[in-house]
Image: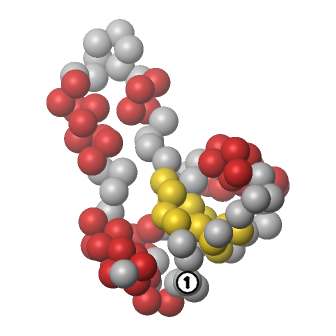
Amino acid sequence: MKYLSLFSGVGGFELGVGDQHECIGFSEIDKYATQVYKKHFNHKEYGDITKINAKELPDFDLLVGGFPDDWTAEGVDGSISDTQRYKMMGNAVTVNVIRDIIKKLL
């Protein structure tokens, strides 16, 4: 199975699937996470998701994505409200790109 990894972080999903499936590429904007990812995986880097042209992606079967680390890590002391957490989670999805990718899959 071929998959596209969005909001990839350091590659947690990739560690989980190992060599069982083929990653066609990844998207991550954090420069340090990208450095770690590239040290462990030789996958095509697409960079910022807002700059991906879904029509130019190779075919794939599965779309995977991570959530922002600070969605749960920060604000444990109450400094981030539940409403703000939900907004941060919602911002993890770039609607136009996801919509184009779904159209490609269909």
Residue farthest toward the bottom in the current orientation of the protein: 56
Inspect this view and state whether residue 29 appears.
no
Horizontal and vertical percent position of residue 40: 81, 53
Horizontal and vertical percent position of residue 51: 43, 76
Horizontal and vertical percent position of residue 24: 65, 74
Q: Residue at x 49, y 47 (%)?
A: 66
Q: Amino acid at mark 1?
A: Asp
Above/below status of 86 relative to 76: below
Instruction: Judge from the rendering whether residue 68 lies leftward or rightward of residue 38; answer left or right.
Output: left
Horizontal and vertical percent position of residue 85: 28, 32
Inspect this view and state whether residue 82 appears.
yes
Which is nearer the eye, 5 or 61?
61
Q: Residue at x 41, y 26 (%)?
A: 72
Q: Tell me the quadrant of the picture where the C terminus can be found.
A: bottom left
Above/below status of 49 relative to 52: above
Q: Residue at x 39, y 70 (%)?
A: 50
**Mark 1 surroundings: few (<14), some (14-19) or many (≥20) residues within 10 A:** some
Q: Tell me the quadrant of the picture where the N terminus can be found.
A: bottom right
What residue does disc 1 label?
A: 59
Instruction: Judge from the rendering whether residue 91 lies leftward or rightward of residue 21; answer left or right.
Output: left
